[in-house]
């Protein structure tokens, strides 16, 4: 990702809503450095108590799969329903599955 | 001035605290939609809302301490320049981002030190509001400080702009530490504390942060006062004219 004008670089923001659950991608923002990115993420994405932990990652540090590879990457699993653990009962008290 | 008792002095004191928050809160709200980048626009408005919220709590309390202004809105919208007691620093125009950041930074350091004393106030409402505000101000200070470092110790242009902001604003910062007979009455009661004693601590923190931002405290600069007598710079009148317009033109207008 190139540095666009003088708005700083692009950062991806991940928010953890509660203890024990994964950080989820919330969106992106511009900031000149990590410290400011974290503060901006706090203001842009957690104003309404959405989270208790924030990660910011420079967008250019993320390696993404490309749409052209989607066929070889994902389609082979389409005809393998036995990989889905649908035959198990979830024990009581297990949260966030 | 009428002879002060504890209640009328507390009223004056709480209004003074609230005016600081409202005037800076309004100034920051002027950035809404005009921030240098979207992220900072939102950051400043968040801070602005915290300040206006704190002003509101304080005005609501002050309204219970006098007979003339019976609601928080009357205190915010129906007083003229001469009745405002905010520091001259806070009414100064936004200028560029350097000036906005420096103004907030100087106030945030002050605010933090002031609140750390006010949580010990014998007045439970002042202590309570201060307790709640400390967390907000901790973040405000972090925000303004981080930008102070980056603009002061950034590019040639950002450094020059910070120096200009310092030249424009420094003379208005000394009056943050002004006190008068209101303080004398309340200090005896343990409600207020001696604000002048914070100045050396404030200056030490500011000098330390300025060094990291490659800035210097101006020497021998004239210090302007007058706010506790209601004598303000010309900017406050314009600010109030805009902020109070609706309630002046349509008194007691409410959302339907």
Image: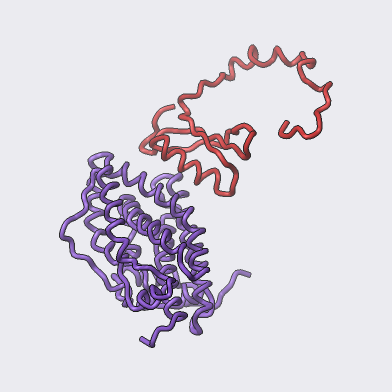
Chain colours: A red, B purple
Residue B49 visible from this viewpoint: no
B178 over B207 or under it: above or below:
below
Could you tell me how many numbered marks the image carries? 0
List the single residue furthest toward the left. B220
x and y, in percent, of residue B189 in the image: 43, 75
Residue B156 visible from this viewpoint: yes
x and y, in percent, of residue B232 in the image: 30, 72
A77 over B179 or under it: above or below:
above
Question: Residue at image x 27%, y 55%?
Answer: B203
Q: Depth check: B254 or A40 in front?
A: A40
Quadrant position of residue B198: bottom left
Q: Depth check: B204 or A26 in front?
A: B204
Question: Residue at image x 37%, y 49%?
Answer: B144
Q: Depth check: A35 or B241 in front?
A: A35
Q: Left of B196 or right of it: where is B62?
A: right
Q: If the image is split into quadrants, where does the N terminus of chain B sit? A: bottom left
Q: If the image is split into quadrants, where does the C terminus of chain B sit? A: bottom right
A57 over A42 or under it: above or below:
above
B60 over B21 or under it: above or below:
below
List the single residue furthest toward the bottom. B2
Quadrant position of residue B19: bottom left
x and y, in percent, of residue A39 in the image: 45, 43
x and y, in percent, of residue B35 in the image: 41, 50
Question: Residue at image x 59%, y 19%?
Answer: A67
């Amino acid at each position: 990702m190139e540095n666009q004008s003088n708005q700083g670089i692009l950062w991806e923001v991940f928010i953890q809503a509660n203890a024990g659950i994964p950080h989820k991608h919330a969106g992106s923002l511009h900031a000149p450095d990590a410290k400011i990115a974290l503060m901006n993420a706090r203001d842009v994405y957690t104003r309404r108590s959405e989270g208790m932990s924030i990660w910011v990652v420079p967008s250019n540090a993320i390696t993404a799969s490309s749409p052209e590879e989607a066929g070889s990457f994902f389609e082979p699993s389409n005809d393998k329903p036995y990989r889905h653990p649908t035959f198990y009962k979830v024990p009581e008290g297990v949260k966030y599955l | 001035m009428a002879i002060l008792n504890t209640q009328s002095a507390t009223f004056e004191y709480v209004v003074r605290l609230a005016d600081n928050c409202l005037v800076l809160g309004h100034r920051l709200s002027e950035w809404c939609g005009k921030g240098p980048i979207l992220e900072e626009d939102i950051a400043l408005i968040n801070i602005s809302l915290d300040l206006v919220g704190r002003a509101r709590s304080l005005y609501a309390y002050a309204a219970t301490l006098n007979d003339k202004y019976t609601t928080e809105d009357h205190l915010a919208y129906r007083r003229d320049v001469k009745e405002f007691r905010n520091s001259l620093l806070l009414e100064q125009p936004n200028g560029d981002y350097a000036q906005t950041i420096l103004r907030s930074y100087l106030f945030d350091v002050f605010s933090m030190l002031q609140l750390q004393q006010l949580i010990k106030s014998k007045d439970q409402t002042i202590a309570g509001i201060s307790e709640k505000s400390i967390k907000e101000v901790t973040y405000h200070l972090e925000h303004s400080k981080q930008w102070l470092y980056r603009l002061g110790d950034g590019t040639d242009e950002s450094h020059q702009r910070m120096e200009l902001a310092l030249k424009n604003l420094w003379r208005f910062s000394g009056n943050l530490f002004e006190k008068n007979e209101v303080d004398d009455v309340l200090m005896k009661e343990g409600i207020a504390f001696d604000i002048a004693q914070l100045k050396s601590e404030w200056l030490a923190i500011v000098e330390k942060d300025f060094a990291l931002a490659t800035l210097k405290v101006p020497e021998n600069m004239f210090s302007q006062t007058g706010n506790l007598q209601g004598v303000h710079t010309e900017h406050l009148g314009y600010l109030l004219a805009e902020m109070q317009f609706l309630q002046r033109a349509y008194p007691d207008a409410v959302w339907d």
